[in-house]
Amino acid sequence: MESLAPTEEIQIEVRLPADGTRAALIHDVREGLSRDLKELPPKYFYDELGSELFEQITELAEYYPTAAERAILRSQSDSIVAAADPECLIELGSGSAAKTRTLLDAMRDRGSLHTYVPVDISEQITRRTAVELIDEYPGMNVHGVICDFESQLEALPGWGRRRMFAFLGGTIGNFPPARRTEFLARIAALLGPEDSLLLGTDLIKDRARLEAAYDDAAGVTAKFNKNVLAVLNRELGADFNLDRFEHVAFYDERNEWVDIRLRSLVEQEISIANLEMTVRFSAGEEMRTEISAKFLPDSLARNYAEAGLRMAELWTDPEHLFALSLARPG
């Protein structure tokens, strides 16, 4: 554990194993590109350029989830904090904590704000955010944890009682159903009787609006999707030509998710030098890069129940585009 600044208000723990991120990338690429339907995990979108492109996406007219979630937080943070009554906020995938400040404001106003725990894979962003937050919230402690929270969830230390875990942005929708239930069950196993989970989920709506959110007219989402190939080129010595792939996004009504893929425009052979691996694509062959599951309140309640949780509260924006729900141990 190391201190970010000469103050006891900030502590940053780096729990990533040495070269663990690269080892995971190698495993995921080798395994995912060997499947009948080739697949890459969406977490590899987010290098520096990918993060910038995603920020652009959140400001697009077609992409409603970020604005809708912010609207709920602005209007309902007091109600959320009153329902959860936390003194410690643990945020999975915290980033710059831009949306989280409304929750911290409500906790401060309620007089219960003690500790904020940002959990993220980026040490640089977490350190910078920690310094900003202790200036904005005098007396608050920041205990950052740098890790891959999906694989290292159980390694998170405890921070007293009345904890609220927050997993915002609809990221839970990127998990296939079985893995989603498993992950929620792992969170449930960490919760004490006074703890809770605040979860962001996108809601089912008409197909046109769903598909437009992931295939915008300006093509920013297409650039974001293709950028994962640039990541493989840089990190693994691959020779993907981004112009030989096109972005595809469609709503799969049976599975209730938006399926995001890259389609090969030509028959081609890709060399991944660092893996001594060759990958062949036929013309028109698609590779999945992300799913984004959508929910109804009833289906969300069932997901919670399968994981040993119960839904205590649910809040939506005025258009019912997005939801924040509070769950407690079942």
Image: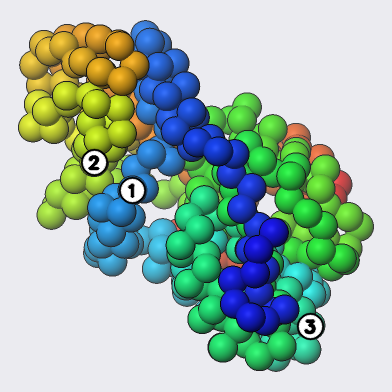
The residue wearing badge 3 is: 112
Q: On residue 47, which mark appears?
A: 1
Where is residue 119? Give x, y as percent. Answer: 61, 57
Total labels drawn: 3
Q: Looking at the picture, which amino acid does disc 2 mark?
A: Asn
Nearest the viewer among 281 and 129 is: 129
If the image is split into quadrants, where does the N terminus sit?
bottom right
Amino acid found under the numbered disc labelled 3: Ser
Viewer-proximal residue among 246 and 210: 246
Residue at which label 2 appears? 227
Q: Give the number of the mark in front: 3 or 1.
A: 1
- Is disc 1 placed on a helix, strand or loop? loop
Residue occupying image coordinates x 74% and y 64%: 164
Mark 2 or mark 3: name the one nearer the start of the chain: 3
Q: Is residue 290 visible?
A: yes
Q: Mark 2 or mark 1: name the one nearer the start of the chain.
A: 1
The amino acid pointed to by label 1 is Asp
Q: Secondary structure at mark 2?
A: helix
Q: Nearer the viewer, mark 2 or mark 3?
A: 2
Residue 243 sits in quarter = top left
Left or right: 38, with 78 as reference point = left
Q: Position of residue 289 (x, y in %)?
A: 35, 32
Q: Is residue 241 above or below residue 58?
A: above
Q: 8 or 84, which is in the foreground?
A: 8
Mark sitting earlier along the chain (3/1):
1
Task: Report how far apart the C-alphas of labels 2 and 1 lie in the structure.
Answer: 9 Å
- Answer whether labels 2 and 1 touch (C-beta < 8 Å): yes
Which disc, if any, is residue 120? none
